[in-house]
Image (tube, rainbow, N blue to C red):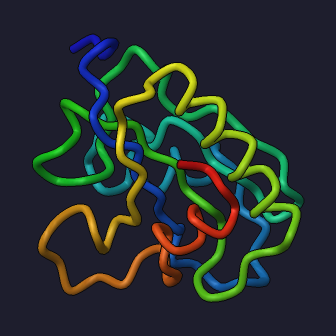
Amino acid sequence: MLLGHNIKKIIVHCSDTPDNENLTASDIHLMHLGFGWDGIGYHKVILRSGKIESGRPLFWKGAHTYGLNDESLGICLIGKTYFDLKQFKSLKKLLKNWKQKFPDATILGHRDAIDTKKTCPNFDVKDWCVKEKIF
């Protein structure tokens, strides 16, 4: 299914993997294939180094937030509880870019996007966006 003008949410996730593991989008792709999915569910992955790697193309429906994939884009920060300043700098850059393309989209953490027991991405995305003046 193609995405486009229907983007209402930008959802930030974490890989929920040990903070010292330097995983890549390819690693996440293999992990998601192992879950029986059609490949990586996120549209972008931010590595520990701050490098932004592509996952699914923006025009493909994601597989990152149950019930919201038709109307959202997903970003995954590699790590669990600690994210490097380089990652936050890249996240800010990516979110600002996507807000220009999709100005009506709401930015949320996975834990705030749906009713879940998950704490992903393990920080308050809304508060962080306010502090970083992303809205």
Instruction: Answer above or below: position of 79 versus 60.
Output: below
Percent x, y of residue 2: 27, 11
- Residue 80: x and y, percent? 58, 82
Which residue is found at the position 50% from the left and 35% from the top? Answer: 43
Q: Position of residue 135 (x, y in %)?
A: 53, 48
The residue located at (64%, 43%) in the rendering is: 26
Look at 47% across and 58% down and name the residue there. Answer: 12
On screen, residue 40 above or below 85: above
Q: Nearer the viewer, residue 66 or 99?
A: 99
Q: How many callouts does the rendering have?
A: 0
Q: Nearer the viewer, residue 128 or 17?
A: 128
Residue 8, by quadrant, is: top left
For this view, does 84 lie left or right of residue 64? right
Q: Is 74 placed above or below 130 here?
A: above
Residue under the image location 26 percent in, 48 percent down? 36
Position of 70 compared to 30: left or right?
Answer: left
Q: Quarter holding the N terminus?
A: top left
Q: Position of residue 86 (x, y in %)?
A: 87, 62
The one nearer the camera, 93 or 39, is: 93
